[in-house]
Amino acid sequence: MRGSKRPGPLGAAMALVFAGAFPCGCRQIGPGLLHSSILSYNEAFNRSSNEQLLVNLVRMRYRHTPYFLEVSSLTNSFSLGAGISSAGNYENKYKPNHVPFFSTANPYVNYGDRPTMSYTPLRGDKFVKQLMSPLSLETLVLLYYSGWSVDRVFRCCVQSMNGIQNAPGASGPTPSYVPQFKNFHHLSGILRDLQTEGAIELGKEPGGKNLAMLIAKNADSEKVDELINMLGLKPGRSFYTLRTGVGDPDPTSINVTTRSLMGVMFYLSQAVEAPLGHEIMGRVTVTRTRQGYPFDWRLITGDVMRIRSSPRRPHRAATAVPYRGTWFYVADDDLSSKATFSLLSQLFSLQAGAVKMQVPTLTLQLGE
């Protein structure tokens, strides 16, 4: 064909390099990198968030101050290219002992990944208020309708219902005495049974704006009667209004005292099983019964959350962190603890997610 030129040796080699580096065409490279990087960063963020939450629970068990960092931004740049380097040797054929034309081609591919991550410390009066303010009843109802069991939500987030105490001393640093909890555990078990049977609902009271506990017409009468008697309510009603705080007794309403997010974290920090050596050295508080025996906090938190300890890194852990020469972890086969950990993560997002902090950020260049 007139005007056309065949590629020389170098051009042909370059074509082969790019064909091998990009067999599906340049248009396929970007989506492939995006797909793999999103999955990788998603997994990394999830793992680091869980580890940060766990290490703060451990800190609180040791009466150390919790501290949180939030990823405020992530930028990344990719570079991908291919090329070829060549070397040649040529001797004049008219010279004696001449060497014919000689060349080598060395193809190469360059790949660059340069992520930059910025962290923002979660602190200041707004964040502290979010941590210290009692959870709203609307938050409990939202969690209820998100599929969480009522007993898990109430055990973690509620401190008392109509005077029935749910280990109020556990809402702060580990107490030296055993708090009241048995009646509330029995109460939350009844609520869970009624929820499973579809006999109760949490929502708006009929024709009103207040939140209420609704009783179905076909509810198990024996369990409903036991619930009504424990809470001191007037029997025969189809709903009972939910109110926050203590207030005056009212046989048609339930007074609910909620924990703050910090209180929920303190409550779950009691599930941290510190090594015996740390207890002997006085690094953690040892709760004792009236007879002076060490109290086992698994009686309160064991079926909700359990954070084990090990001198070595555990092999089968959903989340694990080192702290003070010991590994603390949530076992991968402990489904109840994993569920509560997920609940705590959602609570933290609900409470802290609305806080916009205007403070200096820490920016890290993660790659070259």
Image (tube, helix red, strand yellow):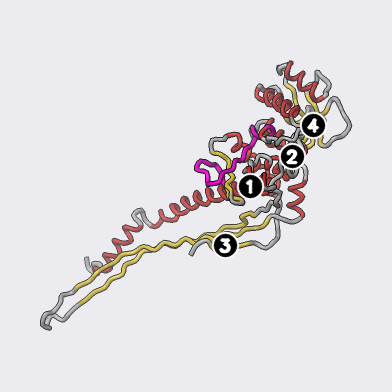
Mark in front: 4 vs 2: 2
Q: What residue does disc 2 label?
A: 170
Q: Quadrant of residue 207?
A: top right
Density class for disc 1 (Cα within 10 Å; few <14, some 14-19, many ≥20) is many
* Residue 33 picture location, percent across and down: 45, 54
Question: Which one is earlier in the sequence, the residue at label 1 or at label 2?
Answer: 1
Mark seen at residue 356: none
Give the vertical position of 207 relative to 270 (above or below). above
| Amino acid found under the numbered disc labelled 1 | Leu
Q: Position of residue 12 (x, y in %)?
A: 26, 65
- Closer mark to the observer between disc 1 and disc 4: 1
Label pair 1/3, CB-CB below 8 angstroms: no
Magenta span includes 301: yes
Viewport quadrant of the N terminus: bottom left
Q: Earlier in the sequence, mark 3 or mark 4?
A: 4
Q: Which residues are magenta?
A: 299-320
Q: Is residue 191 left or right of residue 275?
A: right
The residue carrying mark 3 is 364
Counting from the top left corner in percent of width and height, residue 284 is at 69, 46
Q: Earlier in the sequence, mark 2 or mark 3?
A: 2
Q: CA distance from mark 1 to mark 2?
A: 18 Å
Judged left or right of residue 69, residue 168 is right
**Looking at the image, is mark 4 or mark 2 earlier in the sequence?**
2
Relative to 215, 92 lies left or right: left
- Dots 1 and 4: beta carbons under 8 Å? no
Task: Give the Cα separation between the discs numbered 4 and 2.
Answer: 23 Å
- Residue type highlighted by circle 2: Ala
Location of mark 1 (residue):
53
- Residue kind at label 4, given as amino acid type: Leu
> Does residue 306 appear in this view?
yes
